[in-house]
């Protein structure tokens, strides 16, 4: 469980109790239901991290795009609905070389325009001779992108690195040294779903 969810849930429960005391107990139920949803939304299950020269999904959700990028790279775009786990994980082991936040718009995260125009946090990660980039992208409901790491930090494959709240998108850009093994429309799980294998490894 992400600690933020506990804070939100506690605040909603307190609000429900106050409303129940000032008015009618039945009026507090929407607060209690919202508190239960927060606990569900901020869940953080353990995952089995695959070994070997593979890249794992950095987010739970549905692959809405597998697109060619300049220089022979490939972009995988993952849409996270409010029902998906929103904890983000490192796709490979390595060192974070840059973290760049950019304000922007709040298109529906499943739209292609969200990759370019929406508020986002771009992270560059280098490890074992490869450089990968992933973007935490806010959606129409999400208004807060959280990233736990900073440039120079070493992360392990599948390690928790951040969170996007209440519906979002995550783009992962892999270079030509990676063979993509997923297709558009598939559902993936952060840290445990293999999305690419290192060529020649």
Image (spheres, rainbow, N blue to C red):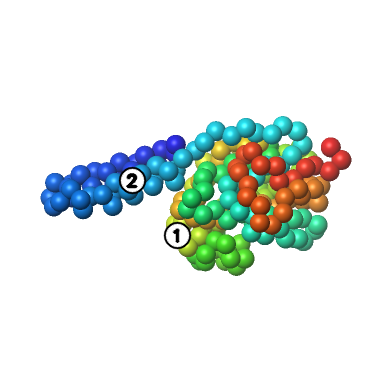
When the figure is inspected, residue 118 is found, relative to residue 39, above or below; the finding is: below
Residue in front for this viewpoint, 130 or 91: 91
Q: Give the image location of residue 4, x and y in percent.
A: 40, 42
Q: Is 65 on the left-hand or right-hand side of 179?
A: left
Residue in front for this viewpoint, 141 or 136: 141
Q: Is residue 199 visible?
A: yes
Outermost residue to the right:
200
**Around disc 1, counting alpha carbons within 10 Å, would you say few (fewer than 14), some (14 to 19), or many (20 or more)?**
some
Outermost residue to the left:
22
Nearest-to-viewer mark from 2 and 1: 2
Residue drawn where x is 74% and y is 55% of the image: 74
The N terminus lies in quadrant? top left
**Around disc 2, counting alpha carbons within 10 Å, would you say few (fewer than 14), some (14 to 19), or many (20 or more)?**
many
Q: Give the image location of residue 123, x and y in percent.
A: 62, 49
According to the picture, the residue beneath numbered tag 1 turns out to be: 141
- Classify residue 68 by image quadrant: bottom right
According to the picture, the residue beneath numbered tag 2 turns out to be: 35
Residue drawn where x is 32% and y is 48% of the image: 33
Q: Give the image location of residue 42, x and y in percent.
A: 44, 43
**Badges 2 and 1: C-beta atoms under 8 Å apart?**
no
- Classify residue 2 by image quadrant: top left
Outermost residue to the front:
26
- Mark 1 falls on what kind of element? loop
Q: Give the image location of residue 114, x and y in percent.
A: 57, 64
Distance of mark 2 from mark 1, alpha carbons?
17 Å
Q: Can residue 156 be seen in this view?
A: no
Residue drawn where x is 52% and y is 66% of the image: 107
- Mark 2 falls on what kind of element? helix
The C terminus lies in quadrant? top right
Q: Which of marks 2 and 1 is nearer the N terminus?
A: 2
């Amino acid at each position: 469980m992400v600690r933020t969810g506990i804070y939100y849930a506690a605040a909603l429960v307190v609000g429900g109790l106050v409303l129940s005391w000032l008015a009618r107990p039945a009026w507090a139920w929407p607060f209690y239901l919202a508190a239960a949803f927060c606990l569900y939304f901020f869940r953080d299950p353990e995952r089995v991290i695959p070994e070997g020269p593979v890249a794992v999904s950095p987010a739970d959700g549905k692959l809405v795009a597998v697109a060619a990028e300049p220089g022979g790279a490939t972009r995988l775009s993952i849409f996270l609905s409010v029902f998906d786990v929103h904890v983000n994980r490192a796709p490979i082991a390595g060192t974070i070389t840059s973290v760049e936040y950019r304000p922007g718009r709040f298109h529906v995260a499943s739209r292609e325009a969200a990759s370019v125009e929406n508020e986002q946090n771009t992270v560059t990660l280098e490890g074992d001779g490869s450089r990968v980039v992933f973007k935490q992208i806010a959606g129409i409901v999400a208004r807060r992108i959280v990233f736990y790491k900073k440039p120079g930090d070493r992360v392990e494959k599948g390690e928790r690195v951040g969170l996007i709240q209440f519906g979002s998108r995550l783009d992962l850009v892999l270079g030509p040294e990676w063979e993509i093994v997923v297709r558009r429309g598939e559902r993936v799980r952060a840290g445990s779903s293999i999305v690419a294998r290192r060529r020649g490894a």
